[in-house]
Amino acid sequence: MKTMKNWARATAAAVLMLCAVALCLTACTSESKVGEWDPMKWKVVTPIANAKDGVYNVPSSGSTFSVVCRNYAGFWFSDIQVDGKYIEWDGKDIYQLDCEQFSAQIQGNKLTLDFKANESAQKRNITISVTAGDVFDTFCFKQLAQQK
């Protein structure tokens, strides 16, 4: 009689253990792979001329450019370059930047860039990269030089 009770307990424990393992294995599956984010989708609100290869042309007098991200509620700056050199900022405000060549601001899902006049004889290449976690996007601008 005692062996029958022990066998019943051992069988019940084995069944519970098997169910727990099966539950763990099925609970960890996912439809999408880790790190798989949808690319950012943009709507241009204030346009400037678009050149070949996705580079926006900014007049030497300056201009405003703004876009709205349609599929992410918020994002922030990841890096900014002017003529291939990274712009340093204190990193405290990842939504706003004011530098010699332009000012940039993110409010919710809207990015606004105000390009200042380029009074030099050299064109400027400006790259703004934003992120919403594991998804990134980059805007490239070429600001024309002052005509003399």
Image: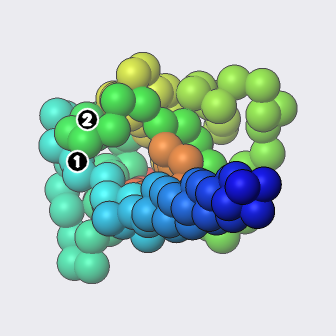
| Relative vertical location of residue 73 with respect to residue 143 in this rendering, above or below | above
- Residue 131 is situated, as x and y percent measured from the top left of the image, at 52, 49
38 sits left or right of 46 in the view = right
Residue depicted at x 68% and y 60% = 4
Percent x, y of residue 57: 29, 60
Q: Quadrant of residue 66?
A: top left
Q: Which residue is mark 2?
A: 68
**Vertical side of 72 occupied by 32: above or below:** below
- Compute the Cα span from label 1 to label 2: 6 Å
> Where residue 110 sits: x, y (%)?
33, 29
Q: Disc 1 designates what residue? A: 42
Task: For label 2, count other residues whose C-alpha is less than 10 Å away and answer few (under 14), some (14-19) or many (20+).
Answer: many
Q: Are marks 1 and 2 in contact (CB under 8 Å)?
A: yes
Give the mark nearest the N terminus, 1 or 2.
1
Q: Residue sitting at 78 percent across and 54 percent down?
A: 2
Rendered residue at 32%/65% (across/down): 31
| SS under mark 2 | strand
Looking at the rendered image, the quarter that the C terminus falls into is: bottom left
Q: Does residue 5 show up? A: yes
Q: Residues within 10 Å of mark 1 (few under 14, many from 20)?
A: some
Residue extending farthest right: 90
In this rendering, position of residue 122 left or right of residue 29: right
Q: Amino acid at mark 1?
A: Trp
- Farthest top residue in view: 107
Label 1: which secondary element: strand
Residue type marked 2 = Val
**Does residue 80 appear anywhere in the picture?**
no
* Viewer-closest of 115 and 119: 115
Residue occupying the far front of the picture: 1
Q: Which quadrant of the figure has residue 77?
A: top right
- Indicate which disc residue 4 carries: none
- Taking the spot 22% from the left edge, 70% from the top edge, the residue there is 51
